[in-house]
Amino acid sequence: MPTYNEAGNLPGMAEALMALPLPGLRLLVVDDSSPDGTGEIAERFAERYGSARMSVLHRTEKDGLGRAYAAGMTRAVAEGAEYVLQMDADGSHPVAKAAELLGVALATDAGVVIGSRYVQGGTLSDAWGAHRKLLSRWANAYAGTILGTRVRDITGGFNIWRADALRAIDLASVDSAGYSFQVEMKYRALRRGFGVMEVPIHFEDRTVGESKMNLMVQLESIIMPWKLRLGASGSRPGAGAGTGSGTG
């Protein structure tokens, strides 16, 4: 769980995750030196729950959401995680769905299971206006069309990964610094032959704090699908790397 200025959201998210009936769950917070004290709050919760259940990775600068995710995933796999759940700290991803995503991952050979807004049963917050909903759907259609995938929510950030898929992707070589990390990771998984499953979720709007989306992040998201496509020697993901949907 990457954080930057999420002091108002992190306590509730940490408590909700720690309350899940998943004995093997461990929370790793990756904080980019948040000036609002998020890192210190995370440390206090880590002391409460103990190092076997929660820890904090402090980075010295704000270096982008994608790189924070990559750093956290790398640490989790190095410490023996068999599955890595990535989710935001802003409350938009439904904590209660974590067990279902894990269930689908355990029941299939998928390299990644996506908490999807855009498969049947997936919904968006009523707080999202028509323009924001249209922009989100366009972004998924744009990236999916360029890259030739059937993933409905390729931009989604609520995903559970098998450790061997993350090792095959080679996190150290991932180019994306911002939100395009989500697209690049799923595309790399497909190209390496891993299956992708999608589970419907309700995506809530944040109620505390501000979005980290800015112009540079948006530009990277527009350019990255073309970089991935052109860097793939013109080939598309094979038939063995298809997508599906699941409910657990």
Image: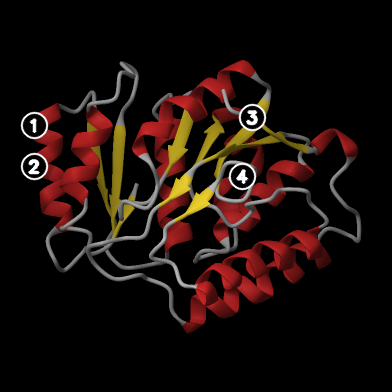
Query: In the image, what residue type sits under mark 2?
Result: Arg
Residue at (88, 41) in percent of width and height:
238
Q: Nearer the viewer, residue 173 or 165?
A: 165
Residue at (59, 57) in percent of width and height:
155
Q: Which sits earlier in the primary sequence, circle 3 or circle 2?
A: 2
Q: Position of residue 148 (x, y in %)?
A: 83, 56
Label 4, residues with CA under 10 Å away: few <14, some 14-19, many ≥20: few
Q: Are marks 2 and 1 in contact (CB under 8 Å)?
A: yes
Q: Is residue 170 left or right of residue 80?
A: right
Residue at (79, 51) in percent of width and height:
149
Query: In the image, what residue type sits under mark 3?
Result: Gly
Q: Is residue 206 above or below residue 197?
A: below
Q: Which sits earlier in the primary sequence, circle 3 or circle 4?
A: 4
Q: Which residue is mark 3?
A: 246
Of circles 1 and 4, which is in front? 1
Q: Position of residue 53 (x, y in %)?
A: 24, 26
Q: Is residue 56 above or below residue 212?
A: above
Cα distance between the residues tagged 3 and 2: 37 Å
Of circles 3 and 2, which is in front? 3
Label 2, residues with CA under 10 Å away: few <14, some 14-19, many ≥20: some
Q: Which sits earlier in the primary sequence, circle 1 or circle 4?
A: 1
* Label drawn at residue 44: 2
**Residue 241 image-quadrant placement:** top right
Of circles 1 and 3, which is in front? 3
Q: Is residue 100 above or below residue 137?
A: above
Q: Which residue is mark 1?
A: 48
Cα distance between the residues tagged 1 and 4: 33 Å
Query: In the image, what residue type sits under mark 4?
Result: Asp
Q: Which residue is mark 4?
A: 170
Residue at (44, 79) in percent of width and height:
214
Q: Please, which colouring scheme is shown?
A: secondary structure
